[in-house]
Amino acid sequence: MAEILVLVDHADGAVRKPALELLTLARRIGEPSAVVLGAGEAAASIAATAGEYGAATVYVADGAEFTEQLVVPKVDALTQLAQEKGAAAVLVTSSGEGKEIAARVALRLGSGLITDAVELEAGENGPVATQSVFAASYQVRSTVTHGVPVITVKPNSAAPEASSAAGTVENVTVSFTGNAAKVVARTPRVSTGRPELTESAIVVSGGRGVGAAEGFAVVEKLADSLGAAVGASRAAVDAGWYPHSNQVGQTGKQVSPQLYVAAGISGAIQHRAGMQTSKTIVAVNKDPEAPIFDLVDYGVVGDLFEVLPQLTDEIGAR
Amino acid sequence: MTLRIAVCVKYVPDATGDRGFADDLTVDRDEVDGLLSELDEYAVEQALRISEESDDAEVTVVTVGPDDAKDALRKALSMGADKAVHVNDEDIHGSDVIATSAILAKALEKTGFDLVVCGMASTDGTMGVLPALLAERLSLPQVTLLSELSVEDGLVKGRRDGDAATELLEAPLPAIVSVTDQSGEARYPSFKGIMAAKKKPVQELDLDDLDIDADEVGLAGAWTLVDAVAARPARTKGTIVTDEGDGGKQLAAFLATQKFI
Ligand SMILES: Cc1cc2nc3c(=O)[nH]c(=O)nc-3n(C[C@H](O)[C@H](O)[C@H](O)COP(=O)(O)OP(=O)(O)OC[C@H]3O[C@@H](n4cnc5c(N)ncnc54)[C@H](O)[C@@H]3O)c2cc1C
Ligand SMILES: Nc1ncnc2c1ncn2[C@@H]1O[C@H](COP(=O)(O)O)[C@@H](O)[C@H]1O
């Protein structure tokens, strides 16, 4: 059966959820093999998880290069594997780094590239990817017509489903090509204890209407009562009220949760680009004319400092 | 020695317009007004700042695009870039990012550079991969998605705020960098800048000038095929209530019907 290479994104020694989604999607178009790079001692447990989600083979490569140089070592490894194993497709998570890796792999393989797929199916002419473009106002279906399809898939595009496979570890020695930027320091992002923005089933976001950094307390309290991740509009981020890593939108994270709550956010096109594919959308805004109300399933015209705490209390009382 | 900075800028349909597709399923560039991609303004800004801080530097803006892409170049020139290169050829229409990167790489080689600055992504395609592809094609280090950038003693240094970590990066020149919208607000063109831009040189190049075969690019040379595009059904507007003291409770009731609580 066609071998599909899946680059497994990991952090803090654990598989990240989007990698499990990729393994799940890969099974629709062939037989997944996982590629685990630079995981050090965690490789064995990561490989085991990949096996539980359907990876027959797990290729493991290690080396300081993967952490000390930007992007290129992973490109070297993935290209080498795709060539040696005659892979039928290569899947990578759509993150800033993931897309860069995929692009360079595609170029080296002489292959077409599709980024930011939200859906993947087997088709007569290879995998068919669906993308959501122009701030999610259009759906585009495309295929790769040249070479080995290299496709990046957005987080939350599929629900991870376990499917036990051998997960046989094969250690790989990579020939590194160089010409990479040096990573001179790395500061891991401190976890807030809340779910990852792109992975969370529920996201509660605050915008300029939150008014100040302290105002985010009401947003966080609601998020915590729902077990949700916290997001922010660019206006709130630019004002310094919330970290950029929590920005939702075109130049922030693109989220696609089951439930998105927008509080004090007007709904500019660049914000919508990051949340419009959410399943259910709810907004609280003082201005009945705010464009965000055009997208909501349920909207409350009102002051978020009244509505959010009352909602939080209601949830607590249930 | 002059520090030669090239900035890649793209002319894109206005995001606040009604963007769509032409009959050949390429991005419609006629119906909606275009402009310099806002994310590339940050690239121009960083190039100008580096240029201002060095004794001797020259900023060239480079675009691959149709006739109207000249507007994007003008805007960058009026912000303060010194000169422009416009690659324009009928046969480029419909090129995918792999082909665009081939054209840009050739144009950059012809122009000459020590540093290439790109935006983080174009606001129409939003792929954010072209800088990495340029690095691959030109065999140069990529120092990309930077929220801070500096050039000193033949080294480029930058900060990349990634998903899982913040990284400090470093590479020798020549190098390819891209900057995010966190890198610093772009300046507005001054009246003087707008007047001066009219006299700045814009070099026109076509595929012949770059020794590129027409069938390597454009729709014919694309390695991906768009099978179908469909407008997403507009979200139907749901229930809107006005808070009269029980807005939070009403919202809770809605979330309960949807089984979120
Ligand atoms: C190239 C580019 C990229 C961009 N990328 C992004 C991006 O990734 N993400 C993003 O979000 N934006 C992005 N933007 C910015 C975007 O255009 C908007 O400026 C931004 O989204 C506005 O944020 P906001 O809705 O919080 O603020 P505003 O538009 O100012 O809206 C604030 C809202 O809060 C409401 N409000 C005020 N007080 C209260 C209250 N007490 N209770 C309830 N409601 C209240 C107001 O009625 C108003 O509707 C980008 C822009 C550009 C040009
Ligand atoms: N046609 C083009 N002409 C010049 N520069 C471009 C072009 N397309 C993309 N770029 C540059 O590459 C960056 C990333 O683009 P993309 O990979 O298309 O999202 C942009 O911000 C520009 O700096």
Image: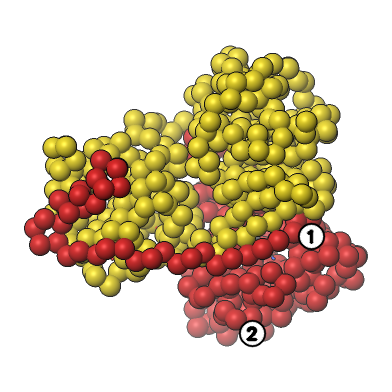
Task: Output the chain of dot 1.
Answer: B
Q: Quadrant of residue B259?
A: top left
Q: Residues within 10 Å of mark 1 (few under 14, many from 20)?
A: many
In space, the residues marked 1 and 2 are separated at their CA atoms by: 35 Å
Q: Residues within 10 Å of mark 2 (few under 14, many from 20)?
A: few
Q: Nearer the viewer, residue B76 or A59?
A: A59
Which residue corresponds to the image point at 52% horizontal and 64% vertical from the top-left?
B232
**Dot 1: element:** loop
**Dot 2: element:** loop
Q: Nearer the viewer, residue A18 or B124?
A: A18
Q: Residue B36: image x %, image y %?
A: 58, 71
Which residue corresponds to the image point at 58% horizontal and 60% vertical from the top-left?
A139
Identified by mark 2, the residue type is Lys
Could one spot residue B114 in this view of the protein? no
The reply to whether label 1 and label 2 mark residues of one chain is: yes
Identified by mark 1, the residue type is Ala
B132 on left or right of A315: right
Q: Residue B129: image x %, image y %?
A: 66, 51
The vertical placement of B202 against A116, above or below, is: below
| Mark 1 or 2, closer to the camera | 1
Task: Output the chain of dot 2.
Answer: B
- Mark 1 or mark 2, earlier in chain: 2
Judge: label 2 CB < 8 Å from ligand 2: no
Chain with colour yellow in the figure = A
Q: Which mark is residue B222?
A: 1
